[in-house]
Image (spheres, coloured by chain):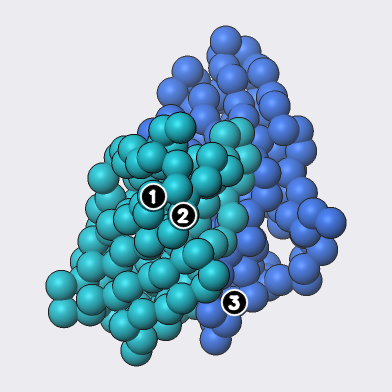
Chain colours: A blue, B cyan
Amino acid sequence: DAMVIQNPRYQVTQFGKPVTLSCSQTLNHNVMYWYQQKSSQAPKLLFHYYDKDFNNEADTPDNFQSRRPNTSFCFLDIRSPGLGDAAMYLCATSGGTGDTGELFFGEGSRLTVL
Amino acid sequence: GEDVEQSLFLSVREGDSSVINCTYTDSSSTYLYWYKQEPGAGLQLLTYIFSNMDMKQDQRLTVLLNKKDKHLSLRIADTQTGDSAIYFCADPPVSGGGADGLTFGKGTHLIIQP
């Protein structure tokens, strides 16, 4: 059974039209991450939540925001998508400090910007 | 910051062994990881190695770690068509404890020839 679930799997939006991607987990993990992966590139960490504590990577554009209303859910909001934001967005979880550091990934949400 | 390097492509014949190599810069990592990504899917943990180990074997997979040279390799014995995927080497970031996510290489595309 899937433990990290992302919706939608495929999202098409227009230039500048806000988008929200969702992630839910059944692992009861403390930490949830959002990665951006462009073609033939390494997944790039955008930000993560350790419980309710939000940690933004220094080079993540302001256009990207996140919300974590409870342990199970985390959202990625792209306020004004540009053509360069077309990518696969991967949600992942981990058990936190003291854990092996293994990340559990969802299947990803592929964003297309027209 | 942390840097993880991999070659982008590896082509092998079905039944041969595949060896995927990775170099990293952070010497303080407790664990190092190999993830597999099939087309259109998220990343799936294949195996990991604890930093005080030189080798770990798990069925067809063998991980070798050379801490002195900061070199990690993944050997897949008897490569099958189902092994065709992108393989990512991953390392916790320099700043990191167990919760700061992982830094990924760009991934090695494993191509299987019949």
Count all numbered tags in the image, as a single digit.
Answer: 3
State whether discs 2 and 1 lie on one chain: yes
- At 16% from the left and 79% from the top, the residue drawn is B68
Q: CA distance from mark 2 to mark 3?
A: 36 Å
Q: Which residue is mark 2?
A: B78
The crowd level at tag 3 (other Cα within 10 Å; few <14, some 14-19, many 20+) is many
What residue is drawn where x is 28% and y is 58%? B22
Give x and y (percent) for residue B111. Answer: 41, 36
Kindly state the secondary structure of the residue where label 3 is placed: loop
| C-alpha span from label 2 to label 1 | 5 Å
Query: In this orientation, which residue lies closer to the viewer: B2 or B23?
Result: B23
Q: In this rendering, does residue B47 appear at all?
A: yes
Chain bearing mark 3: A
Q: Identify which amino acid the numbered label 2 is placed on.
A: Asp
First in sequence: mark 2 vs mark 1: 1
The quarter of the rendered structure image containing the N terminus of chain A is bottom right
Looking at the picture, does residue B32 appear above or below residue A78?
Answer: below
Mark-to-mark CA distance, 3 and 1:
38 Å
Q: Residue furthest bottom?
A: B52
Which of the chains bears the disc numbered 2? B
Q: Secondary structure at mark 1?
A: loop
Query: What residue is disc 3 on?
Result: A96
What secondary structure is marked by label 2? loop
Instruction: Say which amino acid is labelled 1.
Output: Asp
Compared to B39, does A70 lie above or below?
Answer: below
Dot 1 corresponds to which residue?
B16
**10 Å crowding of disc 2: few (<14), some (14-19), many (20+):** some
Discs 3 and 1 lie in a common subunit: no
**Residue A103, located in which quarter of the rendered image?**
bottom right
Residue in the image at 44% along x and 23% along y: A84
Q: Is residue A38 left or right of residue A70?
A: left
Classify 10 Å Cα crowding around label 1: few (below 14), some (14-19), many (20 and above): some
